[in-house]
Amino acid sequence: MFEDSAGALVATAAKIARLQGAIPEADILEQAAASLVQTGSDWDNNREFYALMLQIPIPLYAEIDEHREGFEKMIRRRVQPLARSEVDKVISEVVISPVLAGSVLAEEPIREDGVVAQDDIPTFWQPGFFRLFISHTSSNKESAHRLKEAMAKYHVAAFVAHDDIEPTKEWQAEIERALRTMDALAAIISSDFYSSRWCDQEVGFAFGRGKLVVPVCKDAVPHGFLGKYQGFPAQGLMPSIVAEKVVDTLVGHSLTVERMTEALVERIVTSGSWDVSKRTIKLLEQVPHLTALQIAKLMQAAERNEEVRNAFGVSDRIQALVARIGKPG
């Protein structure tokens, strides 16, 4: 029956959306519980009309609710061609709704593709921030702490074990949670880095998950598997300069640009100064594409946030960025 194809249709649409860079659409489709409900018939033309019902986790619904109708239209246009083989069936609408609190679906923490669901993200990661694990030896804990503070200015939440593990928590389990949910890893490379069993395992974990590793080189250079990753010399540099170099790497790499773009959009939306607005738009001008939701957020920031609207040239640069990348359909 056509109704039984809802899951396959949505899974196929999700894969196509992700390959095409439509990340919010892919996130919605991947996390949705899908069903097809017949809503009407056209007997003269022998057609049946269906609504594609998508139930998504509450946190995701809260994030996209303001633009929900737009996403419903975009997803309808995406799934309609996939059902062309059913010539007498028409998906005429898409309805996105939240999973009701207390239901079985609401308690599911992991998606079928193995991606950690939003509800399972540890609280030490700040919402809306890029998640960076900083691997370091005990001799570099102060450097790691200062780098963490500098990264926060770019909407990057950095995990540093001695800062972020609560004394009552089993520390190894917390490190594993951070590694499992990070977006990338920065390794502070010093002469004692390779003799550290923990640093070696942290880097290996990142490799195993296909995550970007950024070598931050102090008095040593990366070798072995780390040697293929582009690092930079950091000895003697101020933490702010090191953070800037790390951010440039994250924005410029295919493994991290999508998540870093999300963080930078949030940074400009919540900007509290002209300087932050100017620095952030400069970074966003380097990204290859923006999603429909990100474009909408930027346009709203240019209109509603005084620190964006009144920052010299920023609103015009947002308009130019949107024009260059293309407005959502």
Image (tube, grey):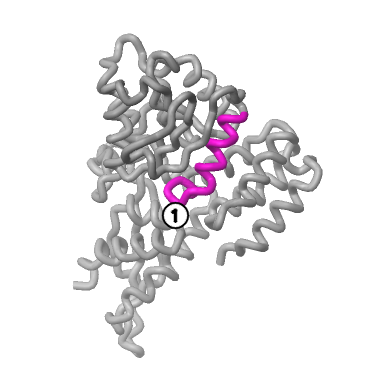
How many numbered marks does the figure carry? 1
Quadrant where the C terminus is found in the figure:
bottom right
In the image, farthest residue toward the top? 167
On screen, residue 47 above or below 106 = below
On screen, residue 174 above or below 290 = above
Pick the front one: 262 or 139: 139
In the image, farthest residue toward the bottom? 44
Residue receiving disc 1: 23
Residue 226: image location, x then y, percent: 36, 38
Q: Residue sitting at 57 percent across and 52 percent down?
A: 287
Pick the front one: 221 or 292: 221
Q: Is residue 137 left or right of residue 305?
A: left
Quadrant where the N terminus is found in the figure:
bottom left
Say which amino acid is labelled 1: Ile
Residue 256 belongs to magenta span: yes
Q: Residue sitting at 28 percent across and 81 percent down?
A: 85
As helix, strand or loop, the secondary structure at mark 1 comes to helix
Crowding near the residue tagged with mark 1, few <14, some 14–19, many ≥20 C-alpha atoms within 10 Å: some
Dominant secondary structure (helix, strand or loop) of the stretch shown in magenta:
helix
In the image, farthest residue toward the left? 1
Residue 161 belongs to magenta span: no
On screen, residue 43 above or below 134 = below
Highlighted range, magenta = 241-257
Residue 263: image location, x then y, percent: 53, 40
